[in-house]
Image (cartoon, rainbow, N blue to C red):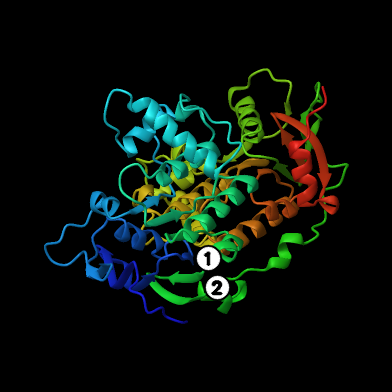
């Protein structure tokens, strides 16, 4: 890799960080030059978030140095925290969203960048809306909306736009941690375009993502981490997808995305039937089928999954026929998924407790066996399943939700964009699990914002403005067709 003669904006040298006996970082070195985008990849728990926490002042390193414009900013006695990082122009969008649900978007903007005077609310609204218009044209958001009323994709857009607002200190380095994990393809493409413009102005960007195509779309350099170390650092033109996945120590079979699995028979038992209504097509799910839900984010896919799940949980009267037990994998794991005060093990076993009893009481041995089995099958990176679930990285928390849903006694699994923050190796393992479970008769209804994942489905229903506007068989599936149907006006 060629090295520029100019002093790098930030240069991390030999960074180490330990949490008790766990070595999260082991001598990491990272050079961040001006006007470049660095793509960072690695499996869940590889040390990516720990390294970024040090760069943005959230954590202090156990050893090593961090240089800004050639000056060591974490030397003995020096102040380095989030406030100082912001002052020198370093900001970060975290993988886990931080908006206050009970506040409006303008008020959330004011918290991030306090504005003086009595008209701060109007100023905050103007700044945020201008940045949303710049990054996500056509976003349809309003400054007076409550953050908690928005779907997760819209909240992620606000979080990103808020970080890019340059209200106090000039922005020099933006760290984006899985920024497109809840965005649909259109919004993700808009963000990638903005990153290109941002670095073209001489600023720097670090993009952490498990969507490897995004790294190759915008990164100038590609950095791969494994087990707390940087194991590969090269120009984008010097690497490819195969080398990147290999450096991560994982496997990926791209052919599996379009593998023609034997579809469920049309004579299979009908488990879900949603009748057609004015402007909305009918939807049917049979045993052994994998059904995809597609379309722009926030157009009714998640709402349908929640309605189906609640219909069985509350036994309420519904026009939707649901003829089996359901389990659910939440996409917004912090709000709808994990129990933050519980252990990893208890979060995993919660949906299977009825099968873990002995003489009417929970059998600890059965629970331990189930947890250990799923920990191995999903490659959960932890030394102790009795630790709090929040001790895990975001991707590993998502694996816990998969384990909970798949271990339940349910004939159908509902999945709300479940691959948020999950590494490529685990994705392949989950895809294989879905194929195996479907072959055994279990059904899946799968909303995904990653188009390639739709090729794992037998049929795909496309949503527009809360309505099902069409059905596509896998043999006829194309991205162009999905996008066209997503924008078509549903028939009255």
Please say if the residues under marks 2 and 1 sit with CB atoms less than 8 Å apart: yes
> Compared to 192, does 462 lie above or below?
above
| Residue situated in front as seen by the camera: 350 or 319 | 319
Would you call the spot at circle 1 few (<14 residues within 10 Å), some (14-19), or many (20 or more)? many
What distance separates the C-alpha of mark 2 from that of mark 1? 7 Å
Whether residue 100 is visible here, answered yes or no, is: no
- Residue 148 position within the rendered picture, expressed as x and y whole percent measured from the top left: 46, 29
Which type of secondary structure does the marked residue at label 2 adopt?
helix
- Residue 18 seen from this side: yes
Name the foreground residue: 372 vs 403.
403
Q: Is residue 8 above or below residue 268?
A: below
Residue nearest the viewer, comparing 194 with 26: 194
Question: Alpha-carbon neighbours of circle 2 within 10 Å: few (<14), some, or many (≥20)?
Answer: some
Q: Going by the image, does 96 lie left or right of 252?
A: left
Q: Is residue 262 above or below residue 417?
A: below
* Residue 374 placement (x, y as % from top left): 52, 56
Residue at horizontal 34%, vertical 48%? 388
Picture quadrant of residue 245: bottom right
Q: Quadrant of residue 417?
A: top right
Q: Which residue occupies 26% across, 51% down?
A: 87
Q: Which residue is mark 2?
A: 236
Front-lying residue, 240 or 314: 240
Q: Which residue is mark 1?
A: 219
> From the viewer's perspective, is 214 left or right of 169?
right
């Amino acid at each position: 890799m060629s090295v520029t003669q100019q002093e790098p904006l930030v240069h991390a040298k030999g960074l180490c960080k330990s949490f008790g006996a766990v070595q999260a970082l082991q001598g990491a070195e990272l050079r961040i030059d001006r006007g470049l985008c660095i793509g960072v990849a690695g499996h869940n728990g590889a040390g990516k978030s720990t390294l970024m926490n040090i760069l943005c002042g959230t954590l202090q390193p156990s050893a090593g140095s961090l240089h800004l414009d050639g000056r060591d900013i974490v030397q003995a006695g020096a102040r380095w925290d989030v406030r100082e990082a912001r002052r020198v122009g370093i900001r970060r969008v975290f993988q886990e969203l931080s908006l206050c649900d009970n506040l409006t978007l303008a008020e959330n903007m004011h918290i991030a960048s306090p504005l003086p005077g009595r008209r701060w609310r109007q100023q905050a609204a103007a700044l945020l809306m201008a940045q949303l218009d710049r990054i996500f044209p056509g976003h349809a958001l309003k400054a007076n909306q409550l953050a908690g009323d928005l779907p997760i994709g819209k909240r992620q857009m606000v979080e990103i736009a808020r970080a890019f607002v340059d209200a106090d200190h000039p922005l020099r380095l933006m760290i984006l941690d899985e920024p497109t994990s809840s965005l649909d393809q259109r919004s993700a493409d808009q963000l990638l375009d903005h990153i290109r413009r941002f670095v073209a102005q001489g600023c720097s960007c670090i993009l952490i993502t498990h969507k490897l195509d995004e790294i190759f779309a915008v990164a100038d350099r590609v950095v791969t981490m494994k087990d707390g170390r940087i194991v590969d650092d090269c120009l984008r033109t010097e690497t490819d997808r195969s080398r990147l996945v290999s450096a991560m120590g994982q496997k990926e079979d791209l052919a599996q995305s379009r593998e023609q699995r034997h579809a469920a028979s049309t004579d299979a038992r009908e488990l879900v039937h949603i009748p057609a209504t004015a402007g909305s097509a009918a939807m049917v799910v049979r045993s052994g089928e994998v059904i995809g839900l597609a379309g722009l984010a926030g157009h009714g896919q998640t709402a349908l999954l929640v309605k189906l799940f609640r219909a069985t949980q509350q036994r309420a009267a519904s026009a939707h026929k649901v003829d089996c037990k359901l389990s659910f994998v939440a996409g917004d794991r912090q709000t709808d998924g994990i129990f933050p005060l519980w252990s990893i093990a208890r979060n995993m076993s919660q949906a299977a407790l009825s099968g873990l009893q002995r003489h009417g009481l929970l059998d600890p041995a059965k629970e331990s066996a189930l947890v250990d089995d799923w920990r191995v099958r999903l490659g959960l990176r932890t030394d102790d399943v009795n630790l709090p679930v929040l001790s895990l990285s975001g991707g590993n928390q998502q694996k816990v939700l998969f384990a909970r849903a798949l271990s339940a006694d349910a004939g159908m699994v509902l999945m709300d964009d479940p691959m948020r923050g999950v590494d490529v190796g685990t994705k392949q393992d989950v895809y294989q699990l879905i194929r195996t479970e479907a072959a055994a008769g279990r059904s899946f209804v799968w909303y995904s914002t990653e188009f390639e994942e739709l090729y794992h489905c037998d049929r795909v229903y496309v949503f527009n403005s809360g309505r099902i506007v069409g059905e596509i068989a896998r043999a006829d599936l194309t991205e162009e067709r999905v996008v066209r149907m997503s924008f078509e006006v549903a028939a009255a």
